[in-house]
Amino acid sequence: MKVELGYGDGFKSLWIPEDMQADIMRAGSCPKMEGKEGRKPVEEALLCPIGTGRLRDLAKGRHNIVIITSDITRPMPTWAVMPDILAELKQAGVKPSEITLVFALGSHRGHTKEEKVHLAGEAVSREIRCIDMDPNDFVHMGQTAHGTPVDVTRAVAEADFCICLGNIEYHWFAGYSGGAKAVMPGVSTREAIQINHSLLTDEEAVVGNADSPVRRDLEEAALYCPIDFILNVILDEHKNIIHAVAGHYILAHREGCRLLDEIYGREIDEEADIVVVSQGGRPKDLNLYQMQKALDNARHAVKKGGIIILTGEAGEGLGEPVFEEWMVNAGSPGEILERIRREFRLGGHKAAGFALTMEKAEIFLVSSLEDEFVRSIFMKPYHELQDAFDAAVISKGRGARVLVMPYGGSTLPILRKERRG
């Protein structure tokens, strides 16, 4: 059986012998949503918002509208949805000069001019102002019960109408992406993000839980920095929009989560000896910081003592300085877990995610990183997927059970007995 896994802008090929027990985890069948008269998902969602009126009605009389969208590390196709958003705003009488598109960086790097144009689309980037959030210019708007400061970039804080865009997929401690995450952590300070993310140590902060304490906290932040409307999309394995929800930042988001579960929550009968996983290529495999999400989903599918083959180019290395410092300076994965319990730091939480997986399974990393460096962060280095797989088969034997997750950041393995319980 031949399988191709996304790697950077291309693929890595894998041949699995026909006599091995191997399954490929793909999304469930779900036709592209189209409404009456063949309307596309975004058009249909904007026509039938959940929990609010239409955007064209809500935005009437507003003169400082901000649209928050994802940065370059996310697959959100901003360029594909902005024309419909702008059409609604024009129907409300809003002028292009009254609209700002803000790229939510969170704790990530800023964009180049070319990246901004790519994300927004050339026509949109010419028509309205498109900016990165300013990490040094924030407004304090309140504080959540958990103590998270609602410190929001000024362009968003001073707007009189806020629209949040995003794609919904599984998130390893916020339950799901999308919704109010555009504000927290999207356009918040690093300190605020760190305090919110410290809730990841709570036992309920797990993938697929929409009531995660992390999400409850970030949705409370939206009470201080109001979100007037959201448009969230669900993508297929090729990053095409197959579903969209619009309207209230909680009600519409939860409907999107339900749809995501139908497509990407995949039951398995038992855990595998070898799990081969990829984020699906760019932009999700730019660095190890982003690849951790696919790794965490794979952790739910691998047997204790098994092997996970994590595949991604990681052309930008680890991708975050604190994450790198925690990984490079640790003496063992256990040391990282001890450190996160006594000293929570944003960036360190990703190192803890790797360490948590390493407690359960060995990680073979197929990437562009130097071999010696990969060994120093407790993983076995490979540059070809086939080489890594062949080594895993030698270790576990031809009778090993294999699971391939070509889009590991999107598909969530669920043990059948767990769902029934």
Image (spheres, rainbow, N blue to C red):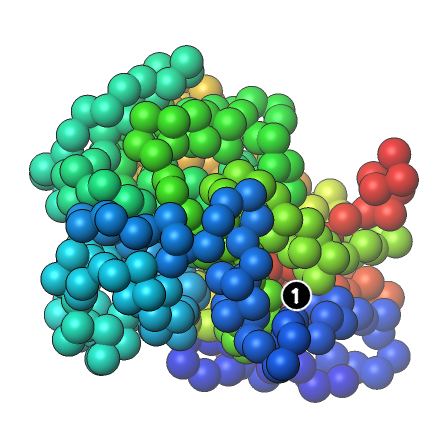
**Residue at (41% x, 15% y) in the render:** 146
Left or right of 206? Residue 416 is right
Q: Nearer the viewer, residue 156 or 173?
A: 156
**Residue at (46% x, 36% y) in the render:** 352
**Residue at (35% x, 15% y) in the render:** 147
On the image, the x and y values in percent for residue 397 come to 80, 65
Q: Residues within 10 Å of mark 1 (few under 14, many from 20)?
A: many
Image quadrant holding the C terminus, namely: top right
Residue 10 appears in which quarter of the rendering?
Answer: bottom left
Q: Is residue 136 visible?
A: yes
**344 versus 372 height, above or below:** above
Residue 263 appears in which quarter of the rendering?
Answer: bottom right
On the image, the x and y values in percent for residue 284 come to 43, 63
Q: Nearer the viewer, residue 264 or 323?
A: 264
Mark 1: amino acid: Met
Helix, strand or loop under label 1: strand
Q: Nearer the viewer, residue 336 or 265?
A: 265
**Residue at (50% x, 70% y) in the render:** 43
Q: How many marks?
A: 1
On the image, the x and y values in percent for residue 344 come to 37, 24
Residue for badge 1: 405
On the image, the x and y values in percent for residue 410 come to 59, 59
